[in-house]
Image: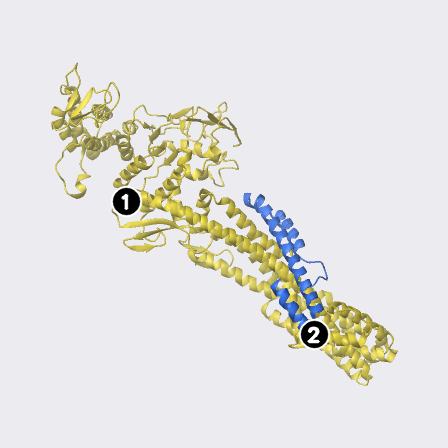
Chain colours: A blue, B yellow
Amino acid sequence: VEAASAINLLGREYRFRERILDWIAKRIQRASEAARVGAEIAARLEQELGGPMRERALRGAELAELADELIAKTVPESGEGS
Amino acid sequence: VRIKALRLAWFRGAAAAVTLGADGKSMGVYGCNGAGKSSFVDSVEYGINGGKIGHLISEYSGRNQENAIPNTHTPANCNTEFSITFQDDSELNVRIARDGKHTRTGGNAVKIEEWDYRRTILRQDEVAEFIRSRKGEKYSALLPLFGLHELEVAAENLRQLARTVEQRSSLHQKQGALGQTAVRRRQFFGTDDDAAIEAAIAALYAKHCPEGKTAAALERCKELETALASRISTLTADNRRHLSLRSLAGVDFSPVVQAVRDTNAKLADSVQPLVNERLSVLESADAFAGKLEDRGDVQCPACGQSVGAGAFKAHVKAERERLSEIIGVFEARRRAVSELIDQFKSFGSMLARPELEEWRASAKETILATNLNWIGRCDAESYRRALREEDLKAIETHGAAVASAAEVASRDAPPDIADITKDNATLDAAKLVAEARELVAEVERIDALVRFIRATEAGIRAEIRERSEAIIAEISADIATMWQALHPGEPIDNVRLYVPDEDKAIDIALRFHGKDQDSPRLTLSEGYRNSLGLCIFLALAKREAGHDRPLILDDVVVSLDRNHRGMVVGLLETKFADRQVIIFTHDRDWYTELRHQLDGRRWHFKSLLPYETPVIGLRWSERTTSFDDARAHLKDRPDSAGNDARKIMDVELALIAEKLQLRLPYLRGERNDHRMWSEFLERLVADGKKCLQKKLSSDYPVFAEGLAALEGAGRLLVSWGNRGSHSRDLEHAEATKLIDTCEKALNVFQCGGCKRPVWFADAANKEWMQCGCGDLRWRYGKG
């Protein structure tokens, strides 16, 4: 909130308020998206670690399936950019 | 949970049913080598490990150990089976079929399969093996006992998952592709940053798409492609020819060919199968190295060199790293070849454009004919399989000749054609950079995922380490106490487990004559190492105190000297008085010590007869003494039988003298330990004339009959015992009489009524010690 207020003031001073606010909104959206993906992956791993992953060595096919699932969660849709 | 009885039938050495009856008490079991003691231990291990016996695992024992577990002479109508009766009278019955598969019934309340093998059974070879093992193996052995096995499994799964994510997402290939784009970017834009490249795109966009509203760079590039293509389509045939010729003239094969040459220099065409083959060998070598001892030399299965076993693991690691580098170079070569093929195909397409038909026809009339024909015939895709130096030279020669001719032919092109050519080239390079941004994002995200999984693994490993250290600190205190009990006042102390800096390792540290040592292997003798292993096992077993499960020790004092064996007895009495301990030993002297020193109210003693044939199997001796060992030699070697009887008397009489607190002349140093039967017997008879009494009505006269038995044994030992040991001409009848007489002499100290020894009760009275019923007495101070 403090950062947003500071940038808000800065924006008024330099008359770029709209662009800066837009930039902040995108950053927040991207950060929350990253947080959401991170939380999803963490939850998925936690679920595995609470069960099969601590009980026995996973087989190659199981590892591949889990890896694909995590990659799918991680990699953004095409065109989303960095 | 205590064991009441173990019953074996046609299991290992056992033939017809034989039962070890412990009745919930501790037991000392004696049997000479091969008598079959371990068959009982094997049955408990079989129960715990669900049908496997560790020391029988081999390529010969069969899938279900069916070649090793049943008695080799099991009759067709008999079953291999065993049962374990527990103190609550529940009974586990196991029947093993001919194919080694087994069925279990009963014993559900006890659940023996949940016992920890390593906290229950300790065998001599396992002690030595544990101390000798590498720190990684100690880690694997101890972690389940610390209750941390699940965490280790989770950490290992995460390690594998991170590798799988890298493989499945082609992370390394994508990182390689980004590297390639970076090279192209440097070639075209030099050190220009993203903003400068975006500005270049913006300038092109303003020039060729003045009405455009797109802001994203990549989208602008796509629109620009369409716009430029549309503009080119409006050009006159002449100008289109000029444009194509300029495009051809702009192709420079040199940097791409050079990239292939650079990688070729490092990598021969035949290296790929070699890499694959050696990688597979190295995988096996890596697994092999994990189990390797640090001693001796080993021939590396990957490179064939003879290396020290200790250095082998480092060698395998170095080989893997070296191969990884080769694989990296191979990948770079593959990309360079691919780029060259793409460039060559693009060159061929440009050359085949219809607007160049006239130029091609005229060129074919000149010296260029050879070059054009070669390019026309060339199958660029075949270069993916093999690309030799002569191919590279041909591409350079023919390509450069055509590009050069195109350059000459396009010199009179109008200025705007040069402009379009330049814009096209800028657009191609800029589009590549814009496209790479998406890949950068993808690579960054996958890399973040891999790092996250690795961080989770590191977190779990930190947790394992923290918990291990806490448990180790606790166990180390017990190990130190037990070590002190076995080795009081000795200059080896501060014995403890510790976690070295690297992951997945546990080792044993100690202080040797004031100097800290990181491993017992540096300074300790075999006997001390085994003693240390025993302390660690007992410390681990002590943590099981809440379960009150039995401790089974199979020949664990073999390498300890007499003093330290004696200390083990003391340790068991003080630290494990409340636990059921079952000791198997082939050490006759130690067994005799156990019988004399351990509390007869809590301990049973039994001895096995020497093994004869698989059909006869295991047999108990009717005696608790070990004279049956001597009798076993009567038939073939009576002199040995007589000699054994004399040796038994050496030990038995020494212990009786100690129990009766006999006063013997002082001897310096070790000579005290080397006294013979004669010294003890002489003093026992002399003192016995005043001290050894047997109740008669209400009186305690001297036990004359007993003294006569002792004197009789003494006389025979002088004449025949020595002959047995020295001249070896003892006859069967003589040896038999000698053994019987010696046994009878020792029985003098055991009450015929209550079966207790004369030193059974001595706490209540300072004047005498006596048996359980008071019929037999030894009066102090009368000697």
Answer yes or no: is residue B454 visible.
Answer: yes
Secondary structure found at label 2: helix
| Disc 2: CA contacts within 10 A as few (<14), some (14-19) or many (>=20) | many
Residue at horizontal 28%, vertical 37%? B570
Q: Nearer the viewer, mark 2 or mark 1?
A: 2
**Which badge, 2 or 1, is on the more N-terminal residue?**
2
Q: Chain of mark 1?
A: B
Question: Going 18% across and 26% down the picture, which residue do you hit?
Answer: B765
- Tag on residue A12? none
- Whole-percent x, y for residue B40 in the image: 41, 31
Report x, y in % for residue B708: 15, 22
Q: Secondary structure at mark 1?
A: loop
Name the residue beneath numbered marker 2. Answer: B197
Instruction: Report the side of B441 relative to B744 (left or right).
Output: right
Residue at left offset 40%, top offset 45% = B129
Q: Quadrant of residue B245?
A: bottom right
Visible residue check, residue B383 = no
Cα separation, mark 2 vs mark 1, equals: 78 Å
* Residue B519 appears left or right of B330: left
Chain designation of label 2? B
